[in-house]
Image: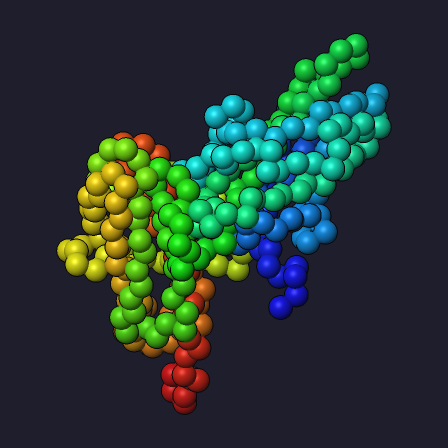
Amino acid sequence: MRERAMLALSLFFLGWHGWGQAASLRVAPARFIVHNMEPGRLYDVYKETGLRLTIYNDDDTSRTWVLSTHRPSERGRWETGYAEIPDPGWCWFDKSEVTVAAKSAGHAHLYLKIPKEEKYFNQHWVVTLGVGGKPGRGGISLAVDVRVQIETKSKADTKAKPDGALGLKPSMVRFEDATPGENVEARVVLYNNDDTTHTYTTASLFENAEIERKAYLTHSYEAIPDPAWIGMTGSVGREKKVRIEPGGSAVLGLRLQVPGAGPDPTGARSARVHFGKKWEDILLIQPDKGLPGFVRVQVQTRDGPKAGVGD
C-alpha cells in the first residue's frame, strides 16, 4: 500500500462557500478530520493529501496573519466525543506568519506528529489552528479558528492503556463483508483511568437530531439507516450501562444485525437493498460525570446476489 494511503482525510466546510470568515478575513478549510494517524510518524498534510490552509485577503492593502495552534479550551470549541489534544505543539505550520497581498490569497502547510507511545493509539482529539491579525502598527484585530479532528490509529493489541480519563481499545470496530439477516459480534474494552468510579452509558450519537453528521462521517460512508441495528450483547434494547471502578476496565460487546430480505414500504421486493453498502455509526460512551468518548463503527455489507428475471 502506498504511503499516502495511510492518511485518510475528510474535509468539512463551514459556511456557504466552505470557509471560516471574520469581516474581510476568510480561511479554508474551516474544519477537517485526519484519520488513522500512527504515533511516531511525521505527517506533512499537504504532501500526503494536497490540503493546505488558504487565507484570503479581500482588502485593498496587504495583510500579515499570525498562525498558531491551541487546545480548544484555550481557543475555540470541539465536537462531542472528542478530547482536547494533550499538546498542541504536536501540530505546527511551516511558517509562523503569512503576508497576503491585496485581493489575493496566501497559504500555509500543516505538520502533525504524535509521540511514539502505545497509549496514543485509539485516540480522538481536537486541536485549534488560530489565524489572527499581527499586532502593531497597521495590524488588524481579526481572527479565525480552524478545528482539526485527529483520530489516531485504532489498535486492539496494545499493551499500554489508552491515554485519557476514558480509554477505548480499539477505538474503531469494522464489520466487514457482513451478510444482511445474520448476526456478527465484536468487543471493545473500556478503561476507567480516572480516580473515581464511573457508570458509562452507551448510545448512538446519531440519535441526537442536533448533531451534524457530516462532521463525523468518513469519506465514502453514510450514516447507518437505523442505529438499532447495532446492539449491546447481554442487554435488552439499545442502551447498556457499565460500571467500572477506578483504574479498572470492562468489556463492551457489540452485535450487528442488518435486516435481510423483506418488503419495503412500496411493496416492492427488497432482498438486495442492504447489500453492497458502507455505513457508519458513532457509538457515544457517556460517563456519569466528565466528557464522553466514542467508538467509530464501520459496516460494509457484502455484495448481494444478482437480480433474476422478474425481480
Residue at the image point whose x is 69% and y is 48% from the top: 44
Position in image of residue 40 (x %, y %): 58, 49
Q: Residue at x 59, y 38 (%)?
A: 90
In the rendered structure, the answer to whether residue 167 lies left or right of residue 246 reads right
- Count of picture labels: 0
Above or below, comparing residue 26 to residue 246 in the picture: above
Q: Residue at x 23, y 57 (%)?
A: 232
x then y, percent, for residue 18: 62, 40
Q: Is residue 152 left or right of residue 284?
A: right
Image point (78%, 34%), residue name: 106
Residue 192 lies, in percent from the top left, at 29, 42
**Residue 149 screen position, x and y as percent:** 52, 42
Q: What colour-coding does the image apply? A: rainbow
Q: In the rendered view, would you say 277 is above or below 154? A: below
Query: Which quadrant does the N terminus fall into?
Result: bottom right
The answer to whether residue 282 is seen in the rendering is: no
In the image, residue 290 above or below residue 278 = above
Side of 26 relative to 223 (left or right): right
Quadrant of image for the C terminus: bottom left
**Camera-nearest residue between 293 and 299:** 293
**Quadrant assignment, res 193:** top left
Name, please, the residue furthest toward the top.
137
**Outermost residue toward the left in this view:** 236
Question: Can the viewer see residue 123?
Answer: yes
In the image: residue 273, left or right of residue 137: left
What is the residue that sits farthest to the bottom in this orientation?
Answer: 309
